[in-house]
Amino acid sequence: MKRVFASRVVLILSGTGLLLLPRLAIADTGIPMLALAWPVAWCLLPAVILSEAYFARRELGLAWGASVRLSAIANLISTFAGIPLILALVVVVGSTADALNLQSHVWRVLLFPFESLRTKPTGLNPFWPMYLSCAVLCVPFCAISIWLETRVGMRRLGTERAPAIRRWSFRANAASYAVIISALLVLASLDAARTR
């Protein structure tokens, strides 16, 4: 009951904030990132599940089938919840920066990952800033994945195995995100070289 009340309060406050500050209500904020990130996340999901199942088997001593089930459930929840959470962060940070008119060079560098995800790549606006931004934002994606997947692991296996579950979640996600970040950096480099 408290959770439902809290959700309604957040929804009401968010809606009120958007009505009072219409500049924050940008219709296409984050849509380019969602269009890029969500399909890629779903395509990578089977490989990530198998990779993280390997870590579950090694770190938690589970049978292969149990490792795959744990990894699949944890990653499905992480994908469904994690991408919208980061997208919400992009919207809030980017819109707040717009509303506060943060234009100094320091702010532009700090806000680069959020701003470039809010612009649509075109012939004049290459893809490399979006790839680079996605690579930078993989750090909070990874943190949220670790947090969510640890919770799933504890719920499925019990809190008495918490240290091993935390170790599994951290190592599995660190390995998965290292590969994803590397691929995004390669794509960013190739696109930057192509558009010179």
Image (cartoon, helix red, strand yellow):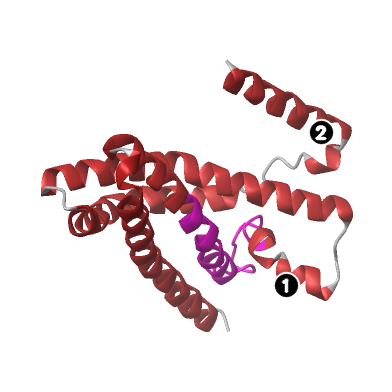
Residue at position x 31%, y 42% from top?
A: 160
Return the mark for residue 17: 2
Q: In which quarter of the image is residue 125?
A: bottom right
Q: Is mark 2 on a helix, strand or loop?
A: helix
Residue at position x 86%, y 50% from top?
A: 99
Residue 178: give x, y in percent of width and height. Answer: 39, 69
- Left/right placement of residue 173 relative to residue 82 reads left
Image quadrant where one finds the N terminus: top right
Image quadrant where one finds the C terminus: bottom right
**Where are the magenta residues, as a range?**
116-144
Q: Please name the predominant secondary structure of the magenta segment in the image.
A: helix
Residue lying furthest front in this view? 160
- Left/right placement of residue 100 relative to residue 118 reads right
Residue at position x 58%, y 23% from top?
A: 3
Residue 144: give x, y in percent of width and height. Answer: 49, 50
Instruction: Identify the residue position indicated by label 1 in the image.
Output: 109
Choose the circle earlier in sequence order: 1 or 2: 2
Q: Amino acid under label 2?
A: Gly
**Quick one: 135 or 171, which is closer to the camera?**
171
- Residue 146 lies in magenta, yes or no? no
Q: Is mark 1 on a helix, strand or loop?
A: helix
Residue at position x 58%, y 65% from top?
A: 133
Give how far apart the Cα atoms at labels 1 and 2 are. Answer: 27 Å
Q: Amino acid under label 1?
A: Val
